[in-house]
Amino acid sequence: MFPKPGVIPLGPLRLGDVLGGAFATLGRYGKQLLGVGAAAYGGALAVVVVSAAIAYSAVADHLDRVLSLGSDENPRTEDWVPLVIAFGSVAVVGLIAAVISTAMMYTAVPAVLQEAVLGRPATFSAVWRRAWARMPAVIGTVLLTWLIALVPLLLAWAGFLAFVIGMLSMDGGSGPVVAILIGVVGALATAPLATWLWVKFSLAPSAVVFENQGPIAAMRRSSRLVRGDWWRIFGITLLAGAIAMVASYLIQIPFSFLGMFSGVLGSMNLGDDPNPASVIVAMSGYVVSILVGQLVSQMVVATFPPLVAGLLYVDRRIRTENLGPVLAEAAAMPPQYSA
């Protein structure tokens, strides 16, 4: 029997140990994890809402003119260009906020696991400081991993587009159909390579936090740890993602019903020819309910898979580097003296 000072036994982990450890971490350190998630995603949502409000106030007149056009009228350039710029800017702000908030969760989870594996308490402030300090490196690691994994798919679609252009220039009757088939086959052919690369570097965020590694060093570390156990890590990671997606769907159901009820009540107060502002006010209850549901479900999706990945990282180090005795010794020492 291996010692179990925290959420997992300090020996090679089975599937039940990994999933049980992830759920146990959520149970014992849920306040810290959900607190970081609420702060990160709530802050991101607030930034997006404020930027959307600023964008709307800046282009409200243009939007009114575009919405008042008849079906046979085209919007003027001086109306639709500001709309594209304003709401395109909101989309960019939203993307940046989403990347930062997700990186905070990818960093906070290993920071909590460092204490959870040893059975030690973790405060919100300590987790937040640790996550904030390592967040830039995690952002670099995640972006590099996505970029490397997407390269095969992007190359396949680039070839597909080139083939489409070539076939269309030849005026072939069946050209577009053949081009689409080639594009689909190319994407399917490169998907295994992209998946292999994604799993190969899936433990890199944990290495960034656990070992204070930089992005490149963490990706190399993940590659070494995954070697020889790719299929097992792939299967467990896929299962964790499926569990998170099912939980996210179930969480959003009551918020969707609440939003629909609120939207119906709001639409009853609209006149025969409502202006855009009144429509936005009437649907605000629906939008708020959906956003809250998305926020809560996103915290689950962004927490559970990284927990599993962090435990797989610990498992691989236990199996390949005999980390178990080191962790057992650290767990028996006072926190201020442990590594």
Image (cartoon, grey):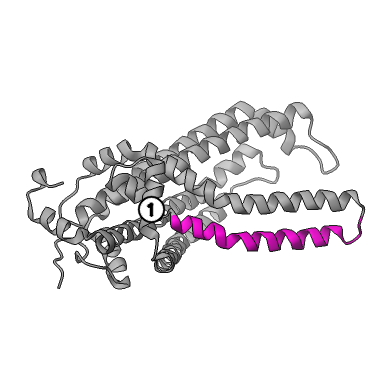
Q: Where are the magenta residues, as a range? A: 172-200
Residue 8 on image: x %, y %? 22, 64
Query: Which of the 4 image quadrants contains residue 311?
Result: bottom left
Residue 64 visible: yes
Residue 149: give x, y in percent of width and height.
53, 52
Which residue is the site of mark 1? 222
Q: Front-most of 312 and 90?
A: 312
Residue 268 highlighted magenta (yes or no): no
Q: In the picture, which quadrant includes the N terminus?
A: bottom left
Q: Quadrant of residue 300 in the image? A: bottom left
Nearest to the observer: residue 248 or residue 272: 248
Q: Is residue 36 visible?
A: no
Secondary structure, magenta segment, majority class: helix
- Identified at 33% across, 61% down, the residue is 312
Instruction: Compare residues 42 and 317 and report the one nearer the observer.
Output: 317
For image coordinates 64% across by 63% down, the residue present is 188
Above or below: residue 86 compared with residue 205 = above
Percent across and percent down for residue 131 are 31, 41
- The residue that appears at 89% across and 48% down in the rendered structure is 169
In this image, 222 relative to 62: left or right? left
Q: Residue at x 82, y 48 (%)?
A: 165
What amino acid is at disc 1?
Answer: Ser
User: In the rendered structure, does residue 184 fall within the stretch colored magenta?
Assistant: yes
Q: Residues within 10 Å of mark 1 (few under 14, many from 20)?
A: many
User: SS of the residue at dot 1?
Assistant: helix
In the image, taking residue 70 as reference, residue 125 lies left or right, namely: left
